[in-house]
Amino acid sequence: MRLAFLATGIFDKGGISRYGRYQIRAFQEILGEEVRVFSLLGPGPNDFEEPLAVHYHGTNGALLNKTRFCKRVLGYCLSWKPDIIWCNHLHLLPFALSLRAFMPNIQVVVNVYGLELWSDRQWVHALTLPRSSMVVADCHFSGSFVDERYKVPRDRIRVVWDCVDTKRFQPAARRNDLLASYGIPSSTEYRYVLALGRIVKGAEHKGYDRLIDCIDQLKSHNNFIALLGGDGNDRQRLERRVKEMGLNKQIFFLGSVPENTLVDVYNLCDLFVHVSDRGYGRGEGIPLTPLEAAACGKPILVGNEDGSQEAVIEGVNGRIVSPRSTELMSETIRELLLNDESRARMGSAARTRVEQEFSYARFSGRILKILKEFGDICQRPSY
């Protein structure tokens, strides 16, 4: 079986690229050299430090680059004759389906996550998703949305939860020297909350403003410190807001976190928070950062409006709250940070659940199961 993996981007540190990298690893372990990877976007200065070999990558999202990308993929597929075109993003699905004009027997698979399903281009998705051979959702919430909104038959929808490298992401002692390098005070009396992700306009649903509001409501607990990791074009606005609210001693911005310190940054916190809201242009599938934090033995707090809630069993490995009430969210944070015993129990359960449900072994096993389904129907086509 030959598989061509088409990606919008595979080099940046976003959740979609991380998900795609795990898929590529699984494909290569299962199919060996019968895998080809094509990325529309090329590597940039703030991307993964660990390189990834691809068969072709473009440079940017400009029309000329997209044209070159499509031309290169078409030429390669016509000569190499893959059985499956697997798209890492809905935006690539129209192009992948157009390849059937040249290769009518090809199977087309597309990943879906969350935000792209209920924001822009919904009319395009309604035309293309039902024509795909299979839709792979990163959570049940998004899978159900595809079924209900886009009328894709349920027997063509598979759910493959995101995964975590549990050998890399493990509980470890807090590095006080790392806190000091960020100018953050360290003491056994402090309790640290961490949020991590892209701080960009258009991703406000991830909840940085909400967390700032919560820390403001909890400022009487001056031993509560929030760490905001990540970078982007909305960071300066948030930094100004924190300064204007007088929270500089309780909220610290870490900037872009290098891969070689990512695990240590997760292990700085006592509680990881990712409370997102959902609406047009807003929301998540199942975000990877809470799962990585859970693998490091941290209880996680998530929202109840999107796929995030699938990361948590309420009261076992964390808590699920509404993003519409910062008062309730603040009270939940307060309860968790003041109860060391409860956090320890939830943190242990968080690690166990990741090992059982979100490990790379489980992830690759689900990918293998899907490929075996195609193995039953894929015939070497004659073009």
Image (cartoon, rainbow, N blue to C red):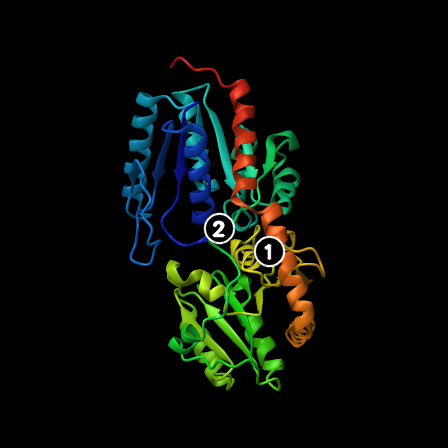
Q: Looking at the rendered structure, which numbered label has been put on residue 167?
A: 2
Quarter of the figure with residue 25: top left
Residue 188 vs residue 251, the one in the foreground: 188
On screen, 122 above or below 372? below
Q: Residue at x 56, y 58 (%)?
A: 290
Q: Which mark is residue 351?
A: 1
Location of residue 71 in the rendering, given as x and y in whole percent from the top left corner: 30, 32
Q: Quadrant of residue 234?
A: bottom left
Q: Is residue 181 above or below residue 285?
A: below
As drawn, the residue found furthest toward the front would be 173
**How crowded is the residue under tag 2: few (<14 C-alpha within 10 Å), some, or many (20+)?**
few
Looking at the rendered structure, the secondary structure element under dot 1 is helix
Percent across and percent down for residue 330 are: 65, 74
| Residue, far top | 382
Q: Quadrant of residue 35?
A: top left
Q: Does 177 sit left or right of 211 as displayed?
A: left
Name the one closer to the observer, 237 or 357. 357
